[in-house]
C-alpha cells in the first residue's frame, strides 16, 4: 500500500513539474485578464463620474439656453454662448443640420460642420451624448457632453466641453502593457512548456524506458541520445555505460566459454596420462609374476606419464599465477640482465639439443636489461628454445637480443619445418597444437606458448611469430624500452 502511495505521489509530482509552465501561464493569463478587466471597469466608472460632474455643472447653463431656444430667441442663445466664460467650460450651439451657430472658443475649425461628431449623433437620437477625444480646435484631449433640445424649428444640440484629466492618457498605455505582457508571457511559457516536453520530459521517459529494458536483460536496446538539451549528457553517459555493460557481458560469456573449454581441455589432457598410469598400476597389481621386460616397460610408462602429468600441472599452475594477480608480480620486478639470461638458457638446454643432433648459437646479443621477473623471463625463453628443439627439426637454433626502434626484442630462430599460415593466428592459444599426436608423443602440454604470451604481456610486451612453411620459424618476445 505504501509503495502504491509513493508511486502515485511520484507521478503526481512528475505531472505537476512537467505541467508547471502551463499552470503558470494560465495563472498569469488570468491575473493579466483580471488586471485588464479592472482597468477597463475603473475607466468606465471614472467616465461616469466625469460625465456626472460635467452634467451637474452643465445642467443649469443648458436650461438657460434651452429656455431661449424654446422661446424662439435664437440670437440671444447664440450671444449667451459666445459671451460665456470659457474658463468654466466651452459651450457650442449646433443647429439641427450640424452647423455650429456659436462657440465659446471661436476658431475657423470650431465652425466646421459637426454632424459627424459622435456626441452630436447620440444627441440627435434624443439622448445625452458623451465623448472623449482629441480636439483639433484646442489641440488637446477633451471631454464632450451634448444635450438635445427639441424646438419647433428642429432639434438643437448644446455641447459642453472641458479639458480631459491628464492621467486619462495612462489608460491606453496600461492596456497596451497588459496586452504585451499577456502575449510575451504566453509565448515564453508556451515555449518553456514545449522545451520541457521535447527536451526534458520525453527524452527522460524514453531513456528511462530503455534503461528499464536493459535492466531486464534486453542488452540489444540502444539508449536514444537527443541532439541537444539537458538530457543529452545523461543519455550519453547511460549509452556509454550500456556499451560497457554489453562488452562486459560479452567478455563474461567469452570467459565462461573459455572456462568450459579450458576445463574440457585440461580434463582431456589429464585423461591420457592418468589412463596410462592407472592401467600400468592395475597390470602390475593383477600379475605379480610379470616378465622383467614387461615390468620394466610398465615402470618406464609410469615414469613418462607421471612426468607428463607433473609438467602439465606445473604449466597450469604457472598460467593461473600469471593471470590471477599480475599487478602483484609487477611490484616485485627487479633489473634483469638479458644478455646473461640468453647465455644461461642456451647453456641449460645445449645438452637436450645435442641429443636431437642440434646446436644452440647466440648470433647477436647487445648488453641490454629490463625491469622484470628473471625466473618468468627465463621460463618464457626456455619454452621457446625447448619448442624449437622438439618440433622444428632444424639442425641449429639461433638466439639474438637487440634493440629495434623503441623495443627490446629477444628472438629464437630455427630453420626447420615452419608453421603453416592457417595455424599461425592460433599458435599462442592454450592447448593449441599444430600436430596434436606428435606434440603429445614428444611430451608437450600445449601450454608453453600461451605461457610465453602471458609472461610477455606481464612485462608490458607481446609475443610474435614470423614463419613460412618449410622455411623455419622466428619466435620473438618484444618488450617496451620503458621497462628497461
Image (cartoon, grey):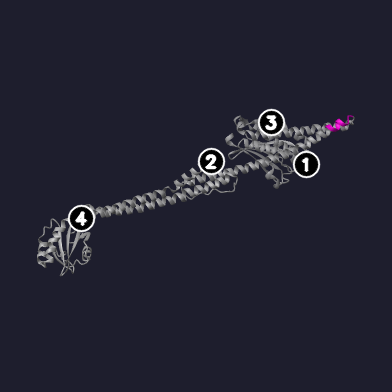
Residue at the spot of label 3: 344
Q: Nearer the viewer, mark 2 or mark 3?
A: 2
N-term-proximal mark, 2 vs 3? 2
Viewed as shown, does residue 315 lie left or right of 161? right
Instruction: Please state the horizontal and vertical placement of residue 189, each as a whole percent of the image.
Output: 40, 50
Was residue 283 drawn as part of the magenta stretch in this picture?
Answer: yes
- Numbered circle sitting on residue 437: 1
| Circle 1 residues within 10 Å: few <14, some 14–19, many ≥20 | few
| Circle 2 residues within 10 Å: few <14, some 14–19, many ≥20 | few
| Real-space CA distance between mark 3 and mark 4, rounded to the nearest whole angstrom | 125 Å
Secondary element under disc 2, as helix, strand or loop, is: loop
- Numbered circle sitting on residue 380: none
Was residue 475 drawn as part of the magenta stretch in this picture?
Answer: no
Residue at the spot of label 2: 1
- Numbered circle sitting on residue 52: 4
| Circle 4 residues within 10 Å: few <14, some 14–19, many ≥20 | few
Instruction: Please state the horizontal and vertical placement of residue 477, each as a whole percent of the image.
Output: 65, 38
- The stretch of residues the image draws in magenta is 281-288
- Is residue 351 visible from the viewing direction of this image? no
Residue placed at 19% from the left, 60% from the top? 145
Instruction: Please state the horizontal and vertical placement of residue 264, each as a whole percent of the image.
Output: 73, 40
Amino acid at each position: 500500500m505504501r509503495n502504491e502511495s509513493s508511486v502515485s505521489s511520484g507521478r503526481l509530482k512528475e505531472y505537476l513539474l512537467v505541467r508547471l509552465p502551463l499552470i503558470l501561464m494560465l495563472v498569469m493569463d488570468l491575473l493579466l485578464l483580471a488586471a485588464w478587466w479592472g482597468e477597463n471597469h475603473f475607466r468606465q466608472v471614472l467616465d461616469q463620474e466625469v460625465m456626472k460632474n460635467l452634467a451637474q455643472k452643465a445642467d443649469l447653463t443648458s436650461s438657460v439656453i434651452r429656455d431661449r431656444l424654446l422661446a424662439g430667441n435664437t440670437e440671444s442663445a447664440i450671444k449667451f454662448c459666445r459671451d460665456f466664460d470659457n474658463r468654466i467650460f466651452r459651450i457650442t450651439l449646433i443647429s439641427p443640420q450640424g452647423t455650429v451657430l456659436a462657440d465659446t472658443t471661436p476658431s475657423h475649425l470650431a465652425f466646421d460642420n459637426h454632424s459627424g461628431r459622435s456626441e452630436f449623433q447620440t444627441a440627435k437620437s434624443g439622448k445625452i451624448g458623451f465623448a472623449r477625444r482629441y480636439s483639433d480646435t484646442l489641440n488637446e484631449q477633451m471631454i464632450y457632453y451634448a444635450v438635445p433640445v427639441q424646438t419647433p424649428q428642429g432639434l438643437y444640440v448644446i455641447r459642453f466641453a472641458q479639458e480631459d484629466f491628464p492621467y486619462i492618457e495612462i489608460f491606453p498605455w496600461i492596456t497596451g502593457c497588459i496586452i504585451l505582457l499577456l502575449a510575451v508571457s504566453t509565448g515564453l511559457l508556451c515555449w518553456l512548456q514545449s522545451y520541457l516536453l521535447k527536451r526534458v520530459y520525453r527524452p527522460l521517459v524514453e531513456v528511462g524506458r530503455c534503461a528499464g529494458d536493459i535492466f531486464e536483460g534486453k542488452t540489444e536496446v540502444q539508449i536514444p541520445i537527443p541532439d541537444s538539451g539537458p538530457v543529452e549528457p545523461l543519455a550519453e553517459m547511460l549509452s556509454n555505460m550500456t556499451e560497457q555493460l554489453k562488452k562486459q557481458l560479452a567478455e563474461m560469456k567469452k570467459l565462461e566459454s573459455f572456462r568450459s573449454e579450458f576445463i574440457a581441455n585440461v580434463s582431456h589432457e589429464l585423461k591420457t596420462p592418468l589412463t596410462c598410469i592407472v592401467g600400468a598400476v592395475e597390470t602390475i597389481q593383477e600379475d605379480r609374476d610379470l616378465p622383467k621386460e614387461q615390468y620394466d616397460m610398465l615402470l618406464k610408462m609410469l615414469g613418462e606419464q607421471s612426468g607428463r602429468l607433473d609438467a602439465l600441472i606445473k604449466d597450469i599452475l604457472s598460467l593461473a599465477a600469471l593471470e590471477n594477480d599480475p599487478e602483484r608480480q609487477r611490484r616485485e620486478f627487479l633489473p634483469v640482465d638479458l644478455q646473461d639470461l640468453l647465455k644461461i638458457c642456451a647453456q641449460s638446454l645445449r645438452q637436450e639439443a645435442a641429443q636431437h643432433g642440434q646446436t644452440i648459437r647466440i648470433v647477436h646479443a647487445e648488453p641490454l636489461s629490463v625491469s622484470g621477473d628473471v625466473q618468468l623471463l627465463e621460463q618464457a625463453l626456455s619454452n621457446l628454445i625447448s619448442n624449437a628443439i622438439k618440433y622444428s627439426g632444424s639442425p641449429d637454433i639461433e638466439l639474438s637480443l637487440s634493440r629495434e626502434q623503441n623495443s627490446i626484442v629477444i628472438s629464437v630462430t630455427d630453420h626447420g619445418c615452419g608453421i603453416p599460415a592457417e595455424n599461425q593466428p592460433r599458435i599462442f592459444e592454450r592447448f593449441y597444437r599444430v600436430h596434436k599426436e606428435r606434440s603429445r608423443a614428444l611430451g608437450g602440454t600445449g601450454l608453453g606458448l600461451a605461457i610465453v604470451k602471458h609472461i610477455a604481456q606481464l612485462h608490458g610486451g607481446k609475443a610474435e611469430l614470423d614463419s613460412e612453411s618449410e622455411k623455419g620459424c622466428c619466435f620473438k618476445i618484444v618488450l617496451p624500452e620503458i621497462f628497461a
